[in-house]
Image (cartoon, rainbow, N blue to C red):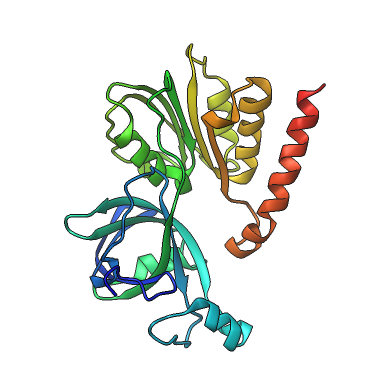
Amino acid sequence: MADGKNGTGVRHATVLRKRWITPHMIRVVLGGDGLAGFTADAYADHYVKLIFPPPGVDYPVPCDLDAIRREMPREHWPRMRTYTVRAWDAATGELTLDFVYHGDEGLAGPWAAHTSPGDQIMFRGPGGGYAPSPAADWHLLVGDESALPAIGVALERLPYGAPARVFIEVAGAAEEQLLTSTGTAEIVWVHRAGRVVGEALVEAVRALTFPPGAVHAFVHGEANFVRELRRMLRVELRVPPERLSISGYWRRGDDDESWRSSKAEWNRLVEAEETAAAVR
């Protein structure tokens, strides 16, 4: 098909190259005819959902996920993992994704570590919804490794000269990356150094003296620290919801499937807590 999809939204891509950009971050570049018609230009947090069949299971081509779930036993259903588009080059048809690698446990990280040029991967997307607002007086970007690709894109898409305060938590100094920006960004690398994910990050953001004017904030990553910072911004500082992009990408103790199944209820409870706190 002309747009590279098979009629069910599933695309097939080929691994072109990969490299380790830090000891625990792998950059994989995808290409091929399956990316014809793909676009990822509107948002800084565009994402795709990678499709992983169980070992030893092959799906027909074209791949129809609805038919697979309808006709195949549950143990043959694919698992999906969501990854931010780090870069999309429409001229070359190359899609870049960054993977956090924590060893051979898990699914997408090990795939990225062991993949080679020529390997195939299926995905759906893109989705997305955040782009730095040109109307903001300043920007706040906060996240852990899972949000680092989106923060990197946001920095590259800030209005020229726009001020930004950026807090990124990583395991240690070796995980820092070179980031560039069209804005005037003050980047603070917060080193976890063995602490619980997000603890040091929350402390760093709370210590910030907020500049005057309207902020546009992007806060994404592990759900527990996101919850704390969301409450700070929405309840304590009264930042209007339309100037906030806040989401828990993952949660300690959950795999992707269990977190996705419980995320709507988690959001409902957090919203209820914030409403109760706001009226006290």
x and y percent of residue 20 in the render?
30, 56
Observer-nearest residue: 254 or 262?
262
Q: Residue furthest top?
A: 212
Q: Quadrant of the N terminus?
A: bottom left
Relative depth, front residue between 225 and 163: 163
Q: Is residue 73 above or below residue 27?
A: below
Where is residue 155, by image quadrant? Answer: top left
Residue at 67% across, 30% down: 231
- Image location of residue 258, percent across then percent down: 65, 62
Q: Tell me which residue sits at (29%, 58%) in the image.
A: 95
On screen, residue 275 versus residue 11, left or right, reads: right
User: Which residue is found at the position 51% from the left and 67% from the top?
Assistant: 80
Q: In the displayed image of the protein, which residue is found farthest to the left?
A: 91
* Left or right placement of residue 3 versus residue 234 in this view: left
User: Residue 195: x percent and y percent?
Assistant: 58, 40
Residue 100 in the image, given as x and y percentages of width and height: 43, 55
Asked if residue 114 lies left or right of residue 259, the reply is left
Query: Where's the C terminus, which quadrant?
Result: top right
Reply above or below: 29 against 13. above
Compare residues 225 and 7 and report the one nearer the observer.
7
Instruction: From this view, report whether residue 18 is shown above or below residue 203.
Output: below
Q: Please give the count of numbered marks on the rendered protein.
A: 0
Determine which quarter of the picture holds residue 267: top right
